[in-house]
Structures are given as C-alpha cells and as structure tokens.
C-alpha cells in the first residue's frame, strides 16, 4: 500500500471530509485508494456482493468538479460509502443476500441512499449479509461467508456482517446496516466498529427489504462515534414514503459530543450483565470504571426484569417469525428450495404463530418499553455488554459459557441487543477493547426514545477515554 493511500485509509469520515474540503486530497484519489483496498482485502473477507467500481469513479469525478466549482454539498461530499445489500439502489443489483433476488435490479433508491447520494456520497458497492437479514453469522449459503478481519476463521456477526467487516478492514469509509435483533450492533461488536441503531422511525426504511417491519431499523456502522453522528445527520428525518417514519425533528447530532459525562447517571442493567465470557466481563467492568472513576459519571445498577424474562424472549421471536413470514409467504410456497436451510426453518416456524400469540407478543413489547422507560426516569442512559461472547468460529453452532454451559450462537450474540428492537429505543455499540485472543469486545449504550444525542455524547466520551483500538492485521 502506498503512503498516500495509507494516509487516506487511516482517516475517519470527519477527518477525510476535512482533507477533501481543504483540497489536500481529491475525491478521485480517495476512491482509487478504497478501490485498491477492496481489491486487496476481498479475496480474504468476502464483504462485498457487488463492487460498483465504474460508478464510484464516475461519482468521484463529478464530486471533484462540483467541489472545485464551489458547490460543496456537505461533509459526505466525495466520501466513499457502501450499503448493506438490503438497500435498493436504482440500476444496481440488490440481492438481499438471497438466491431469490439474485438478479433483482430496482427501479428506485432506498431513502437512506437517496439522502447520502444527495449529500455527495460515492457508492463503492453493496455488502454481503446473512440471507434476508435473518440470522447472526453472515455465513451466507449462496454467496459465501463474510470473514472477520480480526480472525478470518471467525464470523463478523450478522446480519450486517459485510457492513462491519468493510469498516474494520478499511474497505469503506462508512456503511449502512439494518437491525432487527441486533444486526447493526452485533457485527459492530464482533468486528471492532461503532454501530448505531437509531430510535424506531428516526431513519426511513423505504426501499429497504424488510425482515420484520415493526422491529426493523436502519443505521450507520462506522469507525468512530463522531462518524456515526455525522452519518445520522445525513440520513435521519421524516420520510412521507415510510408510514412508520417519525415527524420528531432531528437535531444536529454532532453538537454536544465533546461535552463530557460528568454528573450523568448511567444505569447498569442487572438482567443483562450475567453469563458473560470472562474477557467480556473484565472489559465491561473496566469500561464502567472508566465512565465512573475516570469521567465522573454516576454509575449505578438498575433492574428491568422484562428484558431478560423468557416470556419477553419468546415475544420478540414470535413477532419476527410472523412478520417475516408475511413478507416471504409467496416465495416460501413457490421457491422453498432457494432459501438457505436456517432461513427456511425460521420462516416455516412463523406458520405456527397464531394471531392471538402475535397480539400477546406485541403487548409484551409494551411492558418491556414501560420498564425500560421507568429505569430511564432516574438515569440518562442504560449500559450493558453488546454481546456476551467474542466472535465464534464460522460454522460453530454453540458457544461455551462460564460453568460449562453452552448456548446457541444466535442467543449468545443477540440476548443483549434484541430487547431494544422490541422497545425501539436508540442503542449504540462501541468497542471496549480486545480479548487476550485479540478479538473485539463491545459496550452497549441505550437511551430514551429520540435521545440519540445523549447516547452519542456518552459513547463519544467513553471512546475518547478508551483510546485507539488496535486494527486487525489481516
């Protein structure tokens, strides 16, 4: 890698945007550096399903001309991004990670890409994922597994595995993921990235292939908290094309990132701080010490029983299975053999969810949100680990827990993230360090509905105090 390319790839979006704005580097040079990095890393990672090399170069040249003419569109102008391949892109293949949509060429853009494109972002390509976002491994039976940049024999998490792997490998400056049970935060946790699930309705889902419409979220996966805030500034806001899009005004999410957290109250969720891999437990305790003793926050334990109750876990599962079946019912009937085994099983299980059970599940979600909001009456944010374990190996179905117990991979990875899809609250995953084996570990910060600003403020303060995370060696 050339020194110039290394300098470009070392920058987060905020720094890169500054360099482009100061004419220290051109969008064309930036895109060429990222294309070279994709060519270098893709044989190892399989993070991309489609690389839009020609389109990226064309968009970069256009951005360079606009900036030179004084028509700067904002901080994403000329910045190369990539999208999870659930996001529709006009004239660019959108597969959903599936065989069923292998040749699908949308005639419209997802709103999230429309907003990034209008801000001047450059599209590098579409990212690999767990088929139809219906799993946590990104071990895709049709397109091959995404590999974790920190250990190529391990998963990057899912379902937005390609989105996280591309960030960790520096083969995209910023990416978009989706999150139905933790699919932004889990891969961010396992691949050493920042992953933000905004409040339900904060970011439009128009043009994004759904998994479960009442719990789906769209959000950024980035290198830094400030990049996540910057990207949220671009993609947030009401969209009349999405009936679930909120009209709550979106503030400037960059404002307040440097305000610190002294005096803020941080609630440690009792029900989501047990049965942890030893390295995760040690990292979580160290993060609490940083926020309390180091940064002056008031750290205290809170109890939210419904977040851990088996009834609540069942409720979340029922909602996802039923809503996923509603979208896939015709394909499941006509083309069952075109699904991967695990996704087909999930959809078939949706057939057993009765209408009364679905209604009970939705009522349970209300109880979960009520308890979480009650805890936040006394706290500014809630915290817990993002995942109970570090990245499992590709193909591994169960992971070992302290005491000799084992747990299936999906439960081990999503038990701490999925509750906040059920409640719809904003939640962010921030790296908290590396395990003795060199695998990323992550802290999750959860806030009140539409209070992403406080979540980002706490995450930014912690990230700065933590210091740099060692990148993968690949």
Image (tube, rainbow, N blue to C red):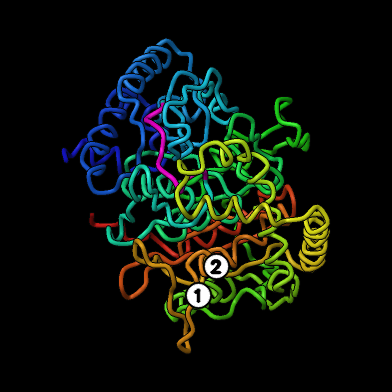
Residue 353 lies, in percent from the top left, at 72, 56
Give the crowd class for mark 2: few <14, some 14-19, many >=20 residues within 10 Å. some
Can you tell which mark lies on residue 251? none
350 or 157: which is nearer to us?
350
Residue 78 lies, in percent from the top left, at 40, 25
51 or 150: which is nearer to us?
51
Q: Is residue 21 in view? A: no
Is 65 situated above or below 390? Answer: above
At numbered mark 2, what does the secondary structure look like: helix, strand or loop? helix
Q: Quadrant of residue 6?
A: top left
At numbered mark 1, what does the secondary structure look like: helix, strand or loop? strand
Residue beneath the point at 67% across and 52% down: 351
Q: Magenta span covers which residues?
A: 123-132
Residue 112 colored magenta? no
Residue 254 lies, in percent from the top left, at 59, 42
- Left or right: residue 315 versus residue 233 is right
Q: Is residue 311 in view? A: yes
Viewport quadrant of the N terminus: top left
Residue 127 colored magenta? yes
Residue matched to label 2: 411
- Left or right: residue 156 versus residue 336 is left
453 or 390: which is nearer to us?
390
Residue matched to label 1: 407
Q: Quadrant of residue 354?
A: bottom right
Total numbered circles: 2
Give the crowd class for mark 1: few <14, some 14-19, many >=20 residues within 10 Å. few
- Left or right: residue 269 versus residue 149 is right
Q: Quadrant of residue 54?
A: top left
């Amino acid at each position: 890698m050339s020194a110039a390319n290394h300098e470009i790839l070392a920058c987060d979006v905020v720094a890169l945007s500054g360099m482009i704005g100061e004419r220290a580097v051109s969008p064309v040079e930036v895109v060429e550096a990222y294309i070279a990095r994709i060519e270098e890393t893709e044989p190892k990672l399989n993070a991309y399903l489609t690389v839009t090399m020609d389109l990226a170069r064309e968009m970069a040249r256009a951005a360079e001309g606009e900036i030179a003419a004084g028509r700067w569109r904002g901080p994403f102008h000329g910045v190369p991004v990539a999208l999870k391949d659930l996001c529709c892109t006009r004239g660019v293949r959108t597969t959903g990670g599936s065989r069923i949509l292998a040749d699908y060429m949308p005639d419209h853009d997802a709103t999230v890409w429309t907003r990034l494109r209008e801000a001047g972002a450059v599209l590098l390509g579409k990212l690999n994922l767990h088929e139809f976002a219906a799993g946590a491994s990104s071990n895709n039976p049709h397109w091959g597994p995404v590999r974790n940049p920190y250990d190529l024999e391990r998963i990057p998490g899912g379902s937005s595995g390609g989105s996280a792997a591309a960030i960790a490998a520096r083969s995209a400056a910023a990416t978009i993921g989706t999150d139905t049970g933790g699919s932004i935060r889990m891969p961010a946790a396992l691949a050493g990235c920042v992953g933000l699930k905004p409040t339900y309705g904060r970011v439009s889902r128009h043009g994004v292939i759904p998994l479960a419409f009442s719990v789906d979220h769209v959000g950024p996966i980035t290198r830094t908290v400030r990049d996540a805030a910057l990207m949220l500034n671009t993609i947030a806001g009401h969209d009349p094309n999405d009936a679930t899009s909120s009209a709550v005004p979106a503030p400037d999410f960059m404002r307040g990132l440097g305000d610190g957290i002294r005096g803020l109250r941080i609630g440690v969720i009792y029900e989501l701080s047990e049965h942890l891999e030893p390295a995760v437990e040690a990292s979580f305790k160290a993060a609490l010490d940083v926020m309390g003793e180091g940064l002056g926050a008031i750290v205290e334990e809170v109890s939210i029983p419904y977040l851990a109750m088996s009834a609540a876990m069942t409720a979340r599962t029922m909602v996802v299975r039923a809503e996923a079946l509603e979208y896939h019912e015709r394909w499941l009937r006509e083309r069952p053999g075109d699904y991967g085994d695990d996704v087909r099983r999930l959809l078939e299980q949706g057939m057993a969810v009765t209408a009364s059970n679905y209604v009970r599940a939705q009522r349970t979600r209300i109880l979960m949100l009520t308890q979480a909001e009650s805890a936040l009456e006394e706290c500014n944010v809630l915290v817990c680990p993002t995942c109970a374990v570090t990245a499992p190996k590709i193909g591994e179905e169960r992971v070992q827990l302290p005491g000799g117990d084992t747990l299936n991979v999906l439960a081990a990875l999503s038990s701490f993230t999925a509750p906040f899809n059920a409640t719809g609250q904003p939640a962010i995953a921030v790296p908290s360090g590396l395990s003795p084996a060199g695998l990323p570990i992550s802290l999750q910060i959860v806030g009140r509905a539409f209070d992403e600003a406080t979540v980002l403020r706490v995450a930014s303060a912690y990230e700065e105090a933590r210091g740099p995370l060692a990148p993968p060696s690949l």
